[in-house]
Amino acid sequence: MANRVKFGVVGLDEMLMGGLLERSICAIVGTYGTGKTMFALQFAYEGLSQGEGVIYISLEEREELLHATMAQKGWDTKVFGDRFSLLRLDPTDFNLAISSIKSELPALIKSTGATRVIIDPISLFEGLFVDESVRRQEMFGFIEMMRDEACTLVVTSETDIRDPNGSRYGLAEYLADAVILLRYIRSPGLTEVHLALEVVKMRRSAHSREIKPFDIHEDGIMVYSEASLF
């Protein structure tokens, strides 16, 4: 039986039947404000807490803001030393961003011994390619490259403005082994808005197919795996 990599989010690991499969690729897909980065940070912190090496590549938030967010949760990343590599790439610098992700990431994984890698959000990397066929080719090549690395990869992706159930470019959910969809759900009377989570797919593993509510608290995320939405 394949080893499991705990996500570190209460309730979500139960929905994943113990966690992600080791060396698999997971996409967290959601619209703005649903907590994609928080899930990614929680995954990173869980790995660090278990003694693993973690690489976190941000294409959006600056390093100091991510460190500040983690500090607000009471997570002291300084104690992890070289086991935590937090990098911010400027997606407007096309050549540098492409080169860093495609050419330098494998070497960084090997030199640090990282077993968890996060790219937040992968949709900004996808957006660097204007031509759709080139985008598909580059994304497929990147994912295949990452499958040769001894790590579990988590990427975040913004939803398509026309389809709240799919990623912006419609690629991440097809290339990933596991897909976690974050969304807003409004009550029937439109008096409340809830955050909800669904494990859309998980290759080579059973998983919960229910939509469950979750909250983002000061000290982390709580998925109410035993609760119903309404």
Image: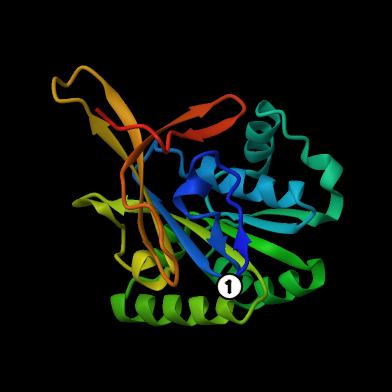
Relative image position of residue 63 (x, y in whole percent): 66, 44
Residue at x 60%, y 45% (from the top left corner): 8
Disc 1 is placed on an element classified as: loop
Eyeballing the image, is 140 above or below 221? below
| Front position in the image: 142 or 65 | 142
The residue under label 1 is 1
Q: Is residue 225 above or below residue 132?
A: above
Q: Is residue 178 above or below residue 38?
A: below
Tell me which amino acid carries mark 1.
Met
- Quadrant in the picture for residue 79: top right
Task: Give the class, few, some or many, for how many residues have Cα within 10 Å of label 1's Cα (few <14, many ≥20).
Answer: few
Q: Nearer the viewer, residue 50 or 130?
A: 50
**91 above or below 100?**
above
Residue shown at the point (51%, 67%) measured from the top left: 25
Q: Check the image and name the residue furthest to the left.
A: 189
Look at 58% across and 24% down and name the residue there: 218
Residue at left offset 77%, top offset 41%: 77
Q: How is the image coloured?
A: rainbow
Residue 59 quadrant: bottom right
